[in-house]
Amino acid sequence: MNFKHPILEHVRRRPALFLGRPSLVRLQAFIQGYSACECDHHFEVVEQDTSEFCDWLSGQLRIPSNVGYVNMLLAVSDGDDAVAFDSFWSWLDKFRALQKVE
């Protein structure tokens, strides 16, 4: 799965239904589980390419990209997972807007 996958918009609108509560850590686990399910059941798999987003976010936050987007956002949210979850969607919107321009 990548960050263009339609299921993400469902999770965004109803995080409690999919995650139990707004949580970036839980969202990452959901994405990984969903991707594993796609592979196991031979669904059309959209590669999980988050590296471009990670590299871009790293430049924006000035944090090394090797820590991953979850840890970057947790770091700038003082470890508050719910704040990091909300922040993720804001950053993703900015990233997607830049992708449309390019």
Image: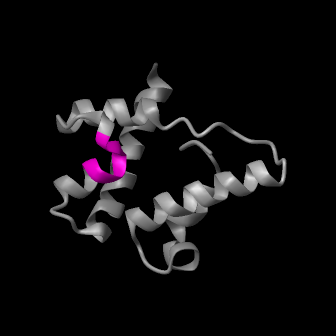
Q: In the image, is residue 66 part of the stretch drawn in magenta?
A: no
Q: Give the farthest residue toward the right.
A: 42
Quadrant where the image shows the N terminus: top right
Secondary structure of the magenta portion, mostly?
A: helix
Nearest the viewer among 68 and 100 is 68
Residue 96 position, x and y percent, is 46, 37
Q: Is residue 34 above or below residue 48?
A: below
| Residue 59, picture quadrant | top left
| Residue 60, picture quadrant | top left
Q: Give the farthest residue toward the top.
A: 102
Q: Is residue 100 above or below residue 74?
A: above
Nearest the viewer among 82 and 25 is 25
What residue appears at the point 58 percent right and 42 percent down from the top-left corner?
Answer: 2
Q: How many marks?
A: 0
Residue 52 position, x and y percent, is 44, 29
Residue 54 position, x and y percent, is 37, 36
What residue appears at the point 54 percent right and 35 percent down from the top-left corner?
Answer: 49
Residue 62 lies left or right of residue 34; in this view the side is left
What residue appears at the point 53 percent right and 67 percent down from the top-left corner?
Answer: 13
Residue 91 position, x and y percent, is 34, 46
What residue appears at the point 39 percent right and 54 percent down from the top-left corner?
Answer: 89
Q: Is residue 3 above or below residue 16?
A: above
Nearest the viewer among 92 and 51 is 51
Say how the picture is coloured: one colour
Q: Which residues are magenta?
A: 67-72
